[in-house]
Amino acid sequence: MAQPQILEKLSKKLASAPTSEENVVYILSLIRKIIEMADFPKKYCILNFYCNLALHSRIDKAPKKVLDMLQRVHEGTDYSNSIINFMDFHRQLQEFLKENNIPNFYRNCKIENFNKLLVAIYSDTPITLKYVEHKISVTSNGGILSSPAK
């Protein structure tokens, strides 16, 4: 499938705020395709990480910016912009939407509802990185668990 067709599908899906886990996972899969086709993984490294996390049962590598964020979460030093608050995710997603002329569903969306869908998706997938000595998991109520990786 070519990039214009994927962007068209994405535009249709984001004409209104997503209301189900299935819609969000599908949207993230389309975004991931665009990021890969446009060769933007560095520019949208956090958005790409979340797209990958929604689609895979294990993440083996991540860019330094994401590793640094996960390390601060593990150490308990920074939850203000952690994987639960999704601040960098939302910032990069909005930038991605603008750059690709995709409708900005944020205008009609309660961010808390969207975050609940994200938490539901990510609570099923522990983040275990080969070169990090801990595993970070999102609980179904939005909490964070950090434990030694096995």
Image (cartoon, rainbow, N blue to C red):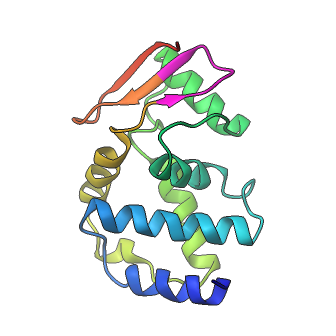
Q: Tell me if 91 is positioned left or right of 66 in this view.
A: left
Q: Quadrant of residue 66?
A: top right
Residue 102 x/y as whole percent? 52, 83
Front one among 81 and 149: 149
Q: Residue at x 67, y 38 (%)?
A: 62
- Residue range in magenta is 127-135
Q: Quadrant of the N terminus?
A: bottom right
Q: Tell me if 78 is positioned left or right of 66 in this view.
A: left
Front one among 24 and 144: 24
Residue 82 x/y as whole percent? 47, 35
Q: Tell me if 29 is positioned left or right of 115 in this view.
A: right
Front one among 27 and 60: 60
Q: Residue at x 51, y 64 (%)?
A: 29
Q: Residue at x 58, y 32 (%)?
A: 69
Q: Quadrant of residue 72?
A: top right
- Asked if 141 appears above or below 97 in the picture, the reply is above
Residue 58 x/y as whole percent? 52, 36
Residue 63 x/y as whole percent? 71, 40
- Asked if 55 appears above or below 105 in the picture, the reply is above
- Asked if 137 appears above or below 14 in the picture, the reply is above
Q: Residue at x 34, y 48 (%)?
A: 121
